Amino acid sequence: MLLVNGRSSIGAGGARYGHNIIDLYETVKAIAADLLPRILTKPNWLTTFSWRDRTPEDFLRRLYDQGNADNRYLLYGYAMWTQDPCMLDAMVFAIRRLIVPLDEQFELRRCAS
């Protein structure tokens, strides 16, 4: 998404993002905040009883803390919540749909019949 929209894949000050999804998301949000979810809510079709709505930032921070390299050998454990796969899917979908040039005009053309 960053590269397609003329941004660098290297963070501010020349530091690489690596796997830091928190910094990456902040950069994506600076470009396209209006196109990203403000809150991750339970899908209507999901029948789980345990669900807490979370902001994307809260979810990504939790995901990063649980899965970053400092926890490679589960030094401080890992716990997955029922909602985690749904929230991850929602975030991946929201960002993947932004892998287009956002500043270009879009022209809808009708197919000749």
Image (cartoon, rainbow, N blue to C red):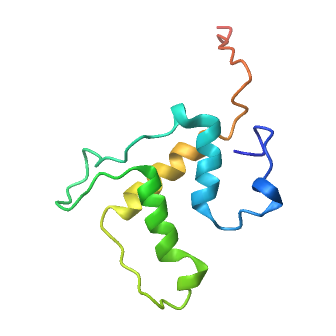
Extreme-left residue of the structure: 49
User: What residue sits 49% from the left and 73% below the top?
Assistant: 65
Q: Tell me which residue sits at (42%, 59%) in the image.
A: 59
Give residue 106's quadrant in the image. Answer: top right
50 above or below 74?
Answer: above
Query: Is residue 1 found left or right of 65 in the rendered image?
Result: right
At a point 40% along the width and 55% down the height, the residue shown is: 87
Query: In the current view of this chain or complex, which residue is farthest to the front?
Result: 13
Question: In terms of depth relative to the viewer, which is nearer, 90 or 109?
Answer: 90
Q: Position of residue 21 (x, y in %)?
A: 59, 61
Q: Quadrant of the image for the N terminus?
A: top right
Q: Residue at x 63, y 65 (%)?
A: 20
**Left or right, 95 with reference to 9:** left
Tell which residue pokes out farthest to the top in this image. 113
**What percent of the width, then of the height, locates residue 30?**
62, 40
Q: Position of residue 19 (x, y in %)?
A: 65, 67
Total marks drawn? 0
Is residue 32 toward the left or the right of residue 39 in the image?
Answer: right
Which one is nearer the viewer's eye here, 55 or 91?
Answer: 55
Rendered image quadrant of residue 33: top right
Q: Quadrant of the C terminus?
A: top right
